[in-house]
Amino acid sequence: MEEKKKEEKQFQSSYTKGQRIVAMIGVIFLLALYVVTLISALTTSPATPELFKMCIGSSILLPIMFWLYIRFAKLFIDRDRKKNGLH
């Protein structure tokens, strides 16, 4: 019985379920951007240069935005726990 508790504690993440979901959504967005850009480049679409620029910009901005969201969510959760005496 005690071994199960140790195993559960060992695999417990410091991030909430919502934060992990947001991170996975960010990964999916980035992968979709790269796939669309690759398909556009292979089909020699006239929109390829613009899609490439958007992909480069999004590759920089999306991770920053998602990191900020996760960071602020963690700060607010910790603040609320301290405020309510749960931490």
Image (spheres, rainbow, N blue to C red):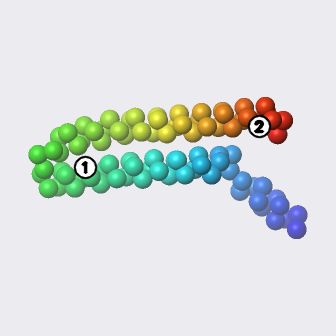
The x, y position of residue 23, in whole percent, is 52, 47
Q: Nearer the viewer, residue 6 or 77?
A: 77
Cβ–Cβ below 8 Å for labels 1 and 2?
Answer: no
The x, y position of residue 75, in whole percent, is 66, 33
Task: Specify the quadrant of the image occupied by residue 82.
Answer: top right
Q: Amino acid at mark 1?
A: Thr
Separation (CA) of disc 1 from disc 2: 43 Å
Residue at 25% in and 49% down: 37
Q: In the rendered view, does 61 fall on the left or right side of 23?
A: left
Give the number of marks: 2
Q: In the rendered view, does 3 fall on the left or right side of 22?
A: right
| Quadrant, the C terminus | top right
Q: In the rendered view, does 8 fall on the left or right side of 61?
A: right
* Residue for badge 1: 37
The x, y position of residue 5, in whole percent, is 83, 61
Residue at 31% in and 50% down: 34
| Dot 2 alpha-carbon crowd within 10 angstroms: few under 14, some 14 to 19, many 20 or more | few
Q: Amino acid at mark 2?
A: Arg
Q: Label 2, secondary structure: give it.
A: helix
The x, y position of residue 15, in whole percent, is 65, 46
* Residue for badge 2: 81
Residue at 49% in and 39% down: 66
The mark lying in front, picked from 1 and 2, is: 2
Residue at 81% in and 35% down: 84
Looking at the image, tell me whether mark 1 or mark 2 is earlier in sequence order: 1
